[in-house]
């Protein structure tokens, strides 16, 4: 403790100021670097699912059967992938559709009133165990 006190007393005023400037410069540089990478992470470009090519193209009944047999393996296979699904609409609520009773698809744009058979493309979010539904978001109607 005494040695530290003597060292502090031996520093001249000029050395203390230089030490403080160096420390402040290092801290400011560190904050700038952290801010830069934080900004790039927060504002990275998002995927455009509508323009992406579908990794899988399936019938709704096949997708439902695969999730029913082994939901964990199917989730690993399809999660966060762009998938094109064909099936029959069983319910519509605004911009959300239920296809074949077990696939919930949320559309990015206004879809109006749609009935009957449908083919859509979207990102598979995963399987909801509670509602027993396969969830899709960023969906768009396929032509």
Image: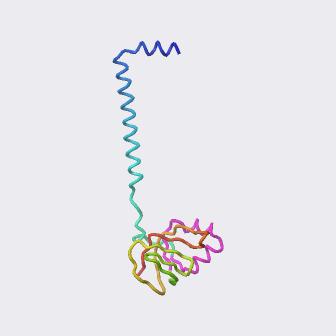
> What is the x, y in percent for residue 125?
52, 67
Q: Nearer the viewer, residue 30 or 1?
A: 1
Residue 116 in the figure: left or right of residue 72: left
Residue 35 in the figure: left or right of residue 57: left
Residue 68 painted magenta: yes
The residue shown at (49%, 74%) is 105
> What is the x, y in percent for residue 74?
60, 69
> What is the x, y in percent for residue 11?
40, 15
The residue shown at (37%, 30%) is 24
| Quadrant where the image shows the C terminus | bottom left
* View extreme (bottom): residue: 116
* View extreme (right): residue: 69
Residue 38 painted magenta: no
The stretch of residues the image draws in magenta is: 57-85
Q: Main secondary structure of the magenta part?
A: helix
> What is the x, y in percent for residue 100?
55, 81
């Amino acid at each position: 403790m005494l040695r530290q006190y003597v060292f502090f007393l031996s520093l001249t005023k000029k050395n203390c100021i230089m030490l403080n400037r160096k420390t402040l410069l290092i801290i400011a540089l560190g904050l700038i670097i952290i801010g830069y990478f934080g900004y790039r992470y927060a504002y990275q470009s998002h995927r455009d699912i509508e323009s992406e090519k579908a990794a899988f193209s399936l019938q709704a009944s096949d997708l439902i059967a695969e999730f029913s047999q082994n939901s964990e393996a199917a989730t690993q296979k399809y999660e966060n992938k762009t998938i094109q699904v064909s099936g029959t609409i069983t319910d519509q609520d605004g911009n959300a559709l239920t296809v074949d009773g077990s696939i919930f698809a949320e559309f990015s744009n206004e879809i109006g009133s749609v009935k009957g058979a449908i083919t859509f493309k979207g990102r598979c979010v995963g399987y909801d165990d509670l509602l027993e539904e396969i969830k899709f978001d960023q969906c768009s109607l396929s032509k």
